[in-house]
Image (cartoon, rainbow, N blue to C red):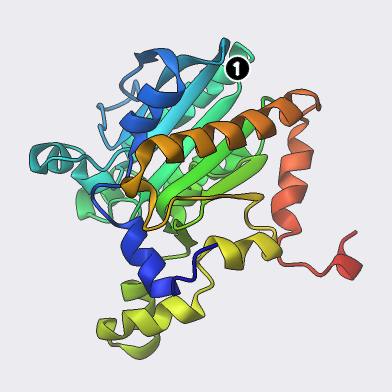
Amino acid sequence: MSKYTPAQRVAIARNPQRPNITDYIDALFTDFFELKGDRLCREDPAILGGVAFYHGRPVTVIGTRKGKTAEESIRCNFGMPSPEGYRKALRLMKQAEKFRRPVITFIDTSGAYPGLEAEARGQGEAIARNLFEMSRLTVPVLAVITGEGNSGGALALAVADRVLMLENAVYAILSPEGFASILWRDAARHEEACGLMKLTAADLLPLGVIDDIIPEPEGGAHTAPSLTMREVDRAISRHLAAMLKESWPHAVRYKKFRKMGVPAKEDT
């Protein structure tokens, strides 16, 4: 694994040329059919979801979308979903459960949109509902953190049986800038915060927060996208094949998250 500092990995994870959800769908899935709307309020383009085939198997694919061009980024709110996005994602996951399709999610977000209008429409409830319902899904759920995975906005798509993480992705309770602002009242100390937050894949694997690290080419996924896609495909194939051989009562997923950070001798 390349010897980047946590702050350098944050910078790589935020690179605007890094592959996004549409790149992964185009490279890894066939016959993708997008499904829109939460059936309650409106469509949120910050979350892209639909049904597709993965190596011939029908699956439900959901991911946060930051956008690549300026226009697309504005339309997708820079990858910060509103409550409608999370409700859409939940609608698709419940549909997947009904038709016994595995769920694969791709996560790259700085967090849920914190605006007043999002809060007025139930942002906190929408995220909490996803956490609750995902923990109870009776189909395999696999999450891949491809870039940033910050706060409850990321976790709302990551309550999964397997959580995979690209080598230079980051996964944390909030952004380093937010952490520094709260702890030291100085966002300029964000690089120092990166070293304390344990937000890299190498930090999180021993803690059981993630289940596997997907290697990236030197310099990051954007330097060799085709190589990155092959590594992601191998990881998803391996874990999904193992998951499909097991039964998935929701209690198993619940216990997985409950035991995170608990020393082995205390695990009951």
Q: Is residue 136 left or right of residue 221?
A: right
Q: Amino acid at mark 1?
A: Arg
Q: Is residue 266 above or below residue 165?
A: below
Q: Is residue 27 left or right of residue 131?
A: left
Residue at image position (47%, 64%) is 173
Q: Is residue 154 left or right of residue 13?
A: right
Q: Residue 63, percent across and down?
A: 40, 35
Q: Quadrant of residue 162?
A: top right
Q: Residue 229, percent across and down?
A: 45, 35
Q: Residue 253, percent across and down?
A: 72, 42
Residue at image position (56%, 15%) is 55
* Structural crowding at the residue carrying mark 1, measured as other residues with C-alpha within 10 Å and reported as few (<14), some (14–19) or many (≥20): many
> Element under label 1?
loop
Q: Which residue position holds label 1?
A: 101
Can residue 75 be seen here? The reply is: yes
Q: Is residue 16 left or right of residue 251?
A: left
Q: Quadrant of residue 247?
A: top right
Q: Is residue 49 above or below residue 57?
A: below
Can residue 133 be seen here? The reply is: no
Residue at image position (30%, 38%) is 65
All told, the count of numbered labels is: 1
Residue at image position (67%, 39%) is 161
For the residue pair 18 and 164, the one nearer the viewer reads as 18
Q: Residue 242, percent across and down?
A: 75, 30
The C terminus: image quadrant: bottom right
The N terminus: image quadrant: bottom right
